[in-house]
Amino acid sequence: MVPLPNILCRWFTENKRDLPWRQDKNPYHIWLSEIMLQQTRVEAVIPYYERFLAACPTVHDLAALEEQKLLKLWEGLGYYSRARNLQKAACILCEQYGGIFPADFHALHSLPGIGDYTAGAIGSIAFGLPVPAVDGNVLRVMARLSGDSRPIDDPKVKKDITMQVQQLLPAGQSGDFNQALMELGATVCLPHGAPKCQSCPAASLCTAFQQGTALSLPARTPKKPRKIQQRTILLLHCQGKIAVRRRPAKGLLAGLWELPAYEGVLSPDALRQALAQDGFSVREILSLRPAKHIFTHIEWHMAGYDIALNACPDGFTWATPHELRGAYALPSAFRPFLQTLEDNPDGL
């Protein structure tokens, strides 16, 4: 029987997707793509990746980038700590390594935002290091191949699977094999819906396929329900400008710009009363469509209001719609309420 690494490396060579970060083995390109791909679909990442590289073609450019420009480049990708850790790591690479990535797993792993998987991906793909790169796709593929019914989010299980991949790494092809496992999980051994077992190159070696258990694997520990937070989002506009403010330096969406908000979901009458108590001179209030945004452990359930003011109160930064689109990083949670600006591109 042909060994699994031979089967998958051949399959990967013939079937891999043509992705921009696969055009070379530049560790900077691999690193950037892997960080962006965390919690984000490939289709969504490609334009961000290309725009980011155009603005920061080298590690030195990333290290020197102004933070607000960095966050604006990242706007919409979420998990903004990833962007900040990218820059922290870039600064270390410039200061300690002259802007050159070290061809060493432990040195890569020591950089901010780089864990086992990312260090393994960079090390194996860029430098050919014999190290595994085990992400969610690889955990799912390996659990199905072996028929492992243990929860893959258990650290011990992940460690066991990582060791299995380590033992399978083919000499001189660790990068291709790691990518083949990832690619198989992304395009064939799918996470949602039925896996495409009939077109899987490893079906003859797959325990789950042979036993008919592919749909029930992998197992996961049941998640705790997310905490629900209700908020009333204010699209305050005055003299053609929109009110924004900075969030606290720590916590959820730390240091990013946001639309002002009240806790809880307020009715129009309750909102008018709250605004009056806070000293706002209101000309008009229009209700916006409610929206929901899901973070990892929290859900925001949001009412929204478009509020025209007679005067621009202190305590906010006032920006034109053009400035909001070009210079201020607003998390995607607020995007549904900014549609008014898209409908009125010349201002309010």
Image: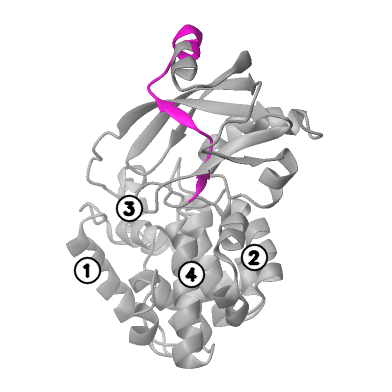
Above or below, 180 against 342 in this view is below
Residue 29: x %, y % from top left:
59, 75
Q: Residue visible at 37% across and 64% down?
A: 205
**Mark 3 = which residue?**
208
Task: Report the span colored magenta.
Answer: 256-272
Residue at 43% of width from left, 59% of height from top? 81
> Is residue 205 found inside the magenta-colored segment of the image?
no
Question: Relative to residue 163, is residue 174 drawn left or right?
Answer: right
Q: Do tag 2 and tag 4 residues touch (Cβ < 8 Å)?
A: no
Residue 103's tag is: none
The kind of residue tagged 1 is Asp
**If you read the primary sequence from the N terminus, does the residue marked by circle 3 or circle 4 appear first?**
4
Measured as percent of width and height from the top left, residue 245 is found at: 52, 42
Q: Which marked residue is nearer to the observer: mark 1 or mark 3? A: 1
Q: Residues within 10 Å of mark 4 (few under 14, many from 20)?
A: many
How far across and down, in percent of the image, does residue 175 sit?
48, 80
Outermost residue to the left: 156
Q: Who is closer to the viewer here, 183 or 70? A: 70
Left or right for 261, reference 298 = right
- Quadrant in the picture for residue 142: bottom left
Element type at marker 3? Answer: helix
Name the mark on residue 52: 2
For marks 2 and 3, give the CA distance: 40 Å
Q: Nearest the camera: 113 or 70?
A: 70
Q: Does dot 4 land on a helix, a strand or a loop?
A: helix
Q: Which residue is mark 1?
A: 160
Label located before the other in sequence (1 or 2)? 2
